[in-house]
Image (spheres, rainbow, N blue to C red):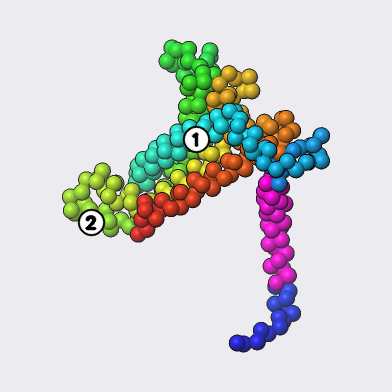
């Protein structure tokens, strides 16, 4: 083996500058990501003391309390129901839009911008607009339908109404990713399919869908995680006095309620750790499904 030569003064200077440039990122990750994550795990085994200080180790007490709580279990069910609406509909609609907007036609850039606009809108603004649309007395939807539907106050349909907002908000982002994936598919495949007499629908299912599966998998996996950690949308759309809140609030919403409004950070940490474990299980299942359903050209 060759002996490692000592660094020259120039190399040492370059190394110092390299560490200096990456230091802010490393410090930021430690302070904003790693330490809070470790502290959350520790707090989940503790009971919060008076004024949020002096935590006392209580073992699995918070976890047993969380698993026995109907509110926590209902929030997990609410989160899953929201994901069932947002993920498949957000992916399917975005894929259809991407196929149409990937063609070289006039106005495609305009429509791409229009569909992507919800992604750059402030969540508070989105919530205000949709709360007005859903308003039971003066909302646009009820006025158009000449009905008196409690879109976000009826426990039976409120979770669907919130899910529709989620689909509307994420379509543009998914669409842009799908367009990027479509542009990576060689055009020769479609030309050969046309020569063989394949219709547009046949080309879509036999060429587009299989070759777009890596992009689809990435979008589905990231959107599942995003849907399971939803908070801001429900926090701003659903008032605390809303009678449908218990049937809509997500797990992160319940975590926020106990950790920050009630000051019970230990119990809140246990709730969010249960969600983290659930997300990890879903991620492992998705990673195993990748080998079966994803095709790389």
Crowdedness of circle 2 by 10 Å Cα count: few (<14), some, many (20+)?
Answer: few
Horizontal and vertical percent position of residue 20: 73, 64
Horizontal and vertical percent position of residue 189: 27, 56
Report the number of discs: 2
Tell me the SS state at disc 2. helix
Camera-nearest residue between 102 and 158:
158
Which quadrant of the rendered structure holds the C terminus? bottom left
Which residue lies at the image location 45% right of the left edge and 39% below the top edge? 87
Q: Which mark is residue 55?
A: none
Q: Residue 80 carries which label?
A: 1
Contact (Cβ within 8 Å) of mark 1 with mark 2: no
Image: magenta residue range: 15-41
Q: Gap between marks 1 and 2, in whole Å?
A: 42 Å
Q: In this view, does 241 lie to the left or right of 217?
A: right
Camera-nearest residue between 91 and 53:
53
Which residue lies at the image location 60% right of the left edge and 32% below the top edge? 68
Camera-nearest residue between 129 and 286:
286
Q: Does the magenta stretch include residue 23?
A: yes
Horizontal and vertical percent position of residue 100: 35, 42
The part of the image, by quadrant, that contains residue 127 is top right
Which residue lies at the image location 60% right of the left edge and 35% below the top edge? 67
The dominant secondary structure in magenta is helix
Residue 181 at least partly seen: no
Crowdedness of circle 1 by 10 Å Cα count: few (<14), some, many (20+)?
Answer: some
Q: In this view, does 211 lie to the left or right of 233?
A: left
Residue 236 at least partly seen: yes
Classify 14 as above or below 89. below
- Which residue is denoted by mark 2 in the rendering? 192
Q: Is residue 26 magenta?
A: yes
């Amino acid at each position: 083996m060759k002996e490692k030569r000592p660094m020259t003064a120039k190399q040492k200077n370059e190394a110092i500058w390299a560490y200096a440039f990456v230091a802010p990122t490393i410090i930021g990750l430690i302070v904003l990501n790693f330490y809070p994550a470790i502290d959350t795990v520790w707090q989940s085994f503790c009971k919060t003391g008076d004024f949020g200080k002096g935590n006392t180790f209580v073992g699995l007490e918070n976890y047993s309390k969380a698993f026995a709580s109907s509110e926590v279990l209902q929030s997990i069910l609410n989160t899953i129901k929201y994901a069932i609406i947002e993920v498949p509909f957000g992916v399917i609609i975005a894929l259809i839009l991407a196929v149409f907007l990937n063609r070289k036609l006039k106005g495609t850039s305009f429509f791409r911008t229009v569909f992507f606009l919800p992604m750059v809108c402030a969540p508070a603004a989105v919530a205000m607009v949709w709360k007005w649309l859903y308003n039971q007395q003066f909302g646009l939807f009820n006025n158009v339908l000449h009905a008196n539907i409690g879109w976000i106050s009826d426990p039976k349909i409120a979770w669907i109404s919130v899910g529709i907002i989620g689909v509307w908000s994420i379509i543009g982002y998914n669409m842009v990713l799908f367009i990027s994936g479509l542009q990576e598919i060689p055009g020769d495949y479609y030309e050969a399919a046309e020569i063989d007499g394949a219709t547009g629908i046949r080309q879509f299912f036999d060429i587009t869908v299989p070759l777009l599966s890596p992009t689809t998998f990435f979008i589905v996996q990231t959107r599942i995680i995003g849907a399971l950690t939803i908070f801001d949308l429900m926090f701003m759309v659903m008032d605390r006095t809303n009678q449908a809140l218990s049937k809509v609030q997500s797990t992160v919403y319940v975590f926020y309620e106990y950790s920050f409004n009630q000051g019970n950070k230990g119990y809140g940490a246990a709730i969010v750790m249960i969600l983290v474990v659930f997300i990890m299980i879903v991620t492992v299942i998705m990673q195993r499904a990748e080998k079966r359903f994803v095709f790389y050209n």
